[in-house]
Image: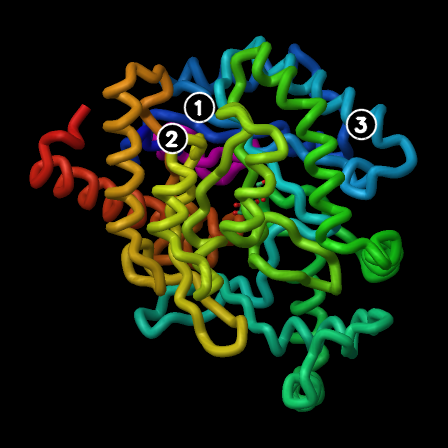
Amino acid sequence: MKETWRWFGPDDPIPLEHIKQAGASGIVSALHHLYRGEPWPVDEVLKRRDEILAAGFVWSVVESIPIHNSIKLRSGPYQRYIEAWKDSLVAVAKAGVPVVCYNFMPVVDWTRTDLQWRLPTTGYALRFDAIDFAAYDLFILKRKDAEVSLSEAQLEAAHVRFTSLSETRRENLEQTIIAGLPGAEASYDRETIRDLIAEYRGMKADDLCNNLCEFLKEVVPVAQELGIRLAIHPDDPPWSLFGLPRVVSTAEDVRRIFSACDTAVNGLTFCVGSFGARADNDLLGMTREFGSRIHFAHLRQVMRESDRSFHEAAHLNGSSDMVGVIRALMEEEAGRRHVGRQDDKIPMRPDHGHLLADDIGKKMNPGYSFVGRLKGLAEIRGVMQGLRNAMPELSD
Ligand code: DNO
């Protein structure tokens, strides 16, 4: 696999020079300041590419081009925003970036309830606590119908939790949940998020999936023409939040999306951590089944706790079989080489990392500190080398 690293651009506290030291050769980046669905200007995209090239890297993946809510709702000015998305694809193609990652999560992108959860090693991890989330939804956001999907026991637990939270922790919880994590496409205040959620009232997962398929029918031919592969990112976490529909959470979801536009260009970002948060996702089976359409891999792990809570574990030591997934991805690459596919090196990045050592206390993007990702990448690299040694047919 091609070792890549997410770089948030010139404002990223981690400079390209450090990424070089980590040994990655590809960069994953986006124009993060353009998140309202507007088209990406060609000159800005080329400028980003030149910065990346000048530091001795290639720009392997765009992550992400945001999808405006009107497209997900398929209402209002959605057609204009679809055209804007296509324009951004054209700009990305001019810069020669072959893969575009995107997601179709309504309102909220990836979501956690704790950004500094102390590990036994004294480092820190990101965590999602289902009871904290319910407490926020019910008693702080006070969303209409927030209680509908919860059992009596969960309601009780959320109430007990809420009463135990200090004012500071309540504020911190709100910041963490709705203010937007790095790479997320929007940040909200309480009123805005309530209004946006209300716009989705009554929308079922089937409706959202249809809107995604309509979107794909328009953009996939454009991507095909431009030589770009699209890689949808799974929902994180892979279940409904705030009563909103989610449509990229399971193998069945992926099958449906793939069959709506049955061409390799319509592909997947295989995020082990996102899919792995559900015990009913068979990650090895999914890697094999979707292999030929996996255009990008996010290698990170979660440790599932009870009742839909999880924390981010060390890259090799969570609830999923990371070594097995890496092996399946390398087997997929070998298969691609065998049939002469040009995209026989799947870009992967060590996704997220614990906050460790010197990074603690520094200004860092949560999940995107240096040392934790460096550790993750080194562990994954070791696994890849071990597999190549043991199975020479996996060497390129
Ligand atoms: C979190 C990331 C997400 C991801 C987007 C893809 O670390 O995996 O922000 O980039 O959901 O569109």
For marks 1 and 2, give the CA distance: 7 Å
Q: Residues within 10 Å of mark 3 (few under 14, many from 20)?
A: many
- Report, in whole angstroms, how far the alpha carbon at label 1 lies from the one at label 3: 25 Å
Task: Identify the magenta region.
Answer: 5-21
Looking at the rendering, which quadrant does residue 78 occupy?
Answer: top right
Q: Can you identify the residue that label 1 sits on? A: 60
The foreground one among 392 and 303 is 392
> Quick one: label 2, few (<14), some, or many (20+) residues within 10 Å?
many
Tell me which image quadrant ligand 1 sits in.
top right
Q: Mark 1 and 2 residues: CB-CB less than 8 Å, in contact?
A: yes
x, y (%) of residue 225? 59, 10
Q: Quadrant of residue 220?
A: top right
Which corner quadrant of the image does residue 118 belong to?
bottom left
The residue at 55%/28% (across/down) is 262
Q: CA distance from mark 2 to mark 3?
A: 28 Å
Task: Classify residue 370 as left or right of residue 386.
Answer: right
Front tag of 1 and 3: 3
Query: Residue 216 at x, y = what percent?
Result: 67, 29
Report the residue marked by disc 2: 347
